[in-house]
Image (spheres, rainbow, N blue to C red):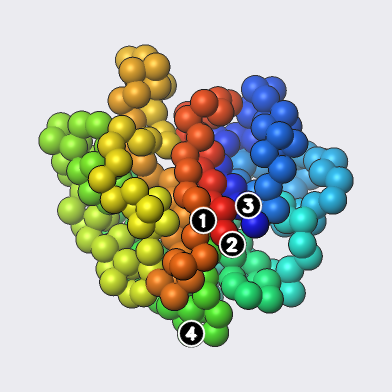
Amino acid sequence: MRLVSWNVNGLRACMGKGFMEFFHTVNADVVALQETKLQPHQIELELDGYEQYWHSAEKKGYSGTAVFTKQKPLSVSYDLPDMENLGFPNEGRVITLEFDEFYFVNCYTPNSQRELTRLEFRMDWEDEFRKYLTELDKKKPVIMCGDLNVAHEEIDLKNPKTNHNNAGFTDKERAKFSELMQSGFVDSFRYLYPDKRDCYSWWSYMANSRARNIGWRIDYFVVSERFKHRIEESSILPEVTGSDHCPVMLEIR
């Protein structure tokens, strides 16, 4: 089974840069998108053989997620539980599909922003998201993917020293990812390739960063610890352009 995750940084823009060609070529069983930046009425995609599930932010042109799947899920849910009582804004960040053997969760984690203006909100969000995943994991194994907006270790970005305490590489964000791993989950890429360097999924548009491979690995497939034996391959596809992120892919047996 082949699963793909991609932050498209605006799906309509990405459509003009080869999205459909990639979609048909990769022929994945499940495709998860982040940062679609779409409201429900703004696009109609013809995807023969796929069910489509969309989740939009209240704020137009911002955030948003989608999942396209060949197999119809048993159930679909949106957001985290109790969002309103938690005071979290509806930013279209989480879609969960239940299949026979696992839950599939597509996530676009809040960016802490420059000056770290959303860091405290993000910390609260991370705690609730981890709690949500661990509750799901009690029922069935979980495959979670998406733009998690954190480079976990120094090996996961080109310039760790100069980026220390910038959004995406603060000690607090990295610690939250570690907490998730300690809660019974595995970073599928590092499970297979613990020491592999220069593997990135996001590059700044500035300073010709992508051509020079000055990037960050912030897009992930995370799976339940008890599901890791089913990982066949976890890969990053930097040759696929169309966004400042590239797709990541998980193949399971």
Marker disc for residue 2: 3
Give the camera-side residue of 164 and 49. Answer: 49
Q: Is residue 212 above or below residue 14?
A: above
Residue at image x 65%, y 67%?
97
Q: Alpha carbon of mark 1 to alpha carbon of mark 2: how far? A: 6 Å
**Amino acid beneath label 2:** Arg
Q: Alpha carbon of mark 4 to alpha carbon of mark 3: how far? A: 24 Å
Regarding residue 182, the answer to whether it shows in the image is: yes
Q: Provide the residue designation for mark 4.
A: 138
Q: Is residue 20 left or right of residue 117?
A: right
Q: Sequence-wise, which precedes: disc 4 or disc 3?
A: 3
Q: Provide the residue designation for mark 2.
A: 253
Residue at image x 44%, y 60%?
222
For the residues labelled 1 and 2, say whether their Cβ atoms are less than 8 Å apart: yes
**Amino acid beneath label 4:** Lys
Q: Sequence-wise, which precedes: disc 4 or disc 1?
A: 4
Q: Position of residue 156 (x, y in %)?
A: 28, 42
Q: Sequence-wise, which precedes: disc 3 or disc 2?
A: 3
Label 3, secondary structure: give it.
strand
Q: Position of residue 154 (x, y in %)?
A: 20, 43
Label 4, secondary structure: give it.
helix
Q: Residue furthest bottom?
A: 138
* Residue density around tag 3, few if under 14, some if 14–19, many if 20 or more, within 10 Å: some
Regarding residue 34, the answer to whether it shows in the image is: no
For the residues labelled 4 and 3, say whether their Cβ atoms are less than 8 Å apart: no
Q: Provide the residue designation for mark 1.
A: 232
